Image: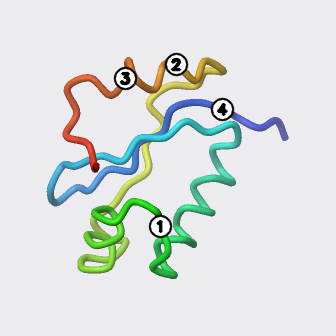
Amino acid sequence: MEKESGVVALRNLKTDKVYLFFSKDIKKDCVDMRFQLDLGMHPCASLQKDYTRTGLEVFRFDTLELTQDEGRLAALSNGLDLYD
């Protein structure tokens, strides 16, 4: 199975805040991120705080665009309420 790369959003459905990232292997990186969050070790402190407080139920991973162009991350973030 071929790896998919692109821009992914981890969306907090309660606050509508979004954590965006570029991935060269979307499936693997989503699993890895969930593992980090479950262990309380994600580098984005505000995302980790929300995840710890609410749990997985209010978060959703969305692939915004399949692309090899890492520069698309900035373009797709326009107008979103992003985690810092």
Asked if the residue under mark 2 is in contact with the one under mark 1, i.e. CB atoms within 8 Å, the reply is no
Of tags 1 and 4, which is closer to the observer?
1
Residue 13 placed where, x, y %? Answer: 22, 55
* Distance between the alpha carbons at the discs numbered 3 and 1: 22 Å
Mark 2 secondary-structure assignment: loop
Tag 3 residue:
76
Q: Is residue 14 left or right of residue 27?
A: left
Give the CA separation, mark 4 to mark 3: 15 Å
Q: Amino acid at mark 3?
A: Leu
Can you identify the residue that label 4 sits on?
5
Q: CA distance from mark 4 to mark 2?
A: 13 Å
Dot 1 and dot 4 residues touching (CB under 8 Å): no
Residue topped by disc 2: 71
Residue at 28% of width from left, 63% of height from top?
46
Q: Is the Cβ of the residue at disc 3 closer than 8 Å to that at disc 2? A: no
Query: Identity of the amino acid at label 1?
Result: His
The residue located at (48%, 39%) in the rendering is 8
Q: Which is closer to the viewer, label 4 or label 2?
A: 2
